Amino acid sequence: MKMRFDAVLVVLVVASALGVISAQHQARKFYSELEREQVRARGLEVEWGQLQLEQSTWAAHARVEKLAREKLGMRPPAQGQVMVVEP
């Protein structure tokens, strides 16, 4: 009977040790994945900042006005062509 009890305890200890090893492995794997995603997030933040800067450059009033004048031949309306619409 004692031998059977000892065998059960050994099996439980081995199972517990394997569970700890498995949990540590999974925790390391998740931590590694977390670090990869944090690096990716930092890269995306840098790209977002660059895109915002590019957008502000493309949408600058002076640039839009210059393109309207040069490429589209647009000019401000003459004094008599302006109509004010009241609500």
Image: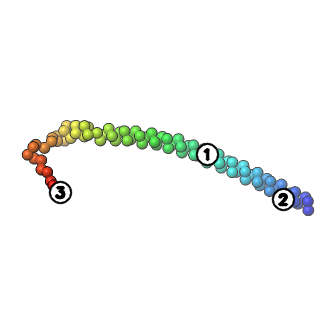
At which x and y percent is residue 75?
15, 41
> Do the residues under discs 1 and 3 have CB atoms within 8 angstroms?
no
Sequence-wise first label, 2 or 1: 2
Horizontal relation, residue 70 to residue 28: left or right: left
> Do the residues under discs 2 and 1 have CB atoms within 8 angstroms?
no
Q: Secondary structure at mark 1?
A: helix
Query: Looking at the rendered structure, which numbered label has been put on residue 31?
Result: 1
- Residue count near mark 2 (Cα–Cα under 10 Å), binned few <14, some 14–19, many ≥20: few
Q: Secondary structure at mark 2?
A: helix
Under mark 3, the amino acid is Pro
Under mark 1, the amino acid is Tyr
Under mark 2, the amino acid is Val
Residue beneath disc 2? 8
Horizontal relation, residue 6 to residue 83: left or right: right
Sequence-wise first label, 3 or 2: 2
Alpha carbon separation for disc pair 2 and 1: 34 Å
Comparing labels 1 and 3, the label whose residue is closer to the camera: 3
Would you identify the image quadrant in which residue 70 lies?
Answer: top left
Which residue does the image show at 57% across and 43% down from the upper left?
Answer: 35
Residue beneath disc 3? 87
Examine the rendered structure and indicate whether residue 56 appears above or below residue 7: above
| Rendered-image quadrant of the C terminus | bottom left
Examine the rendered structure and indicate whether residue 7 appears above or below residue 48: below
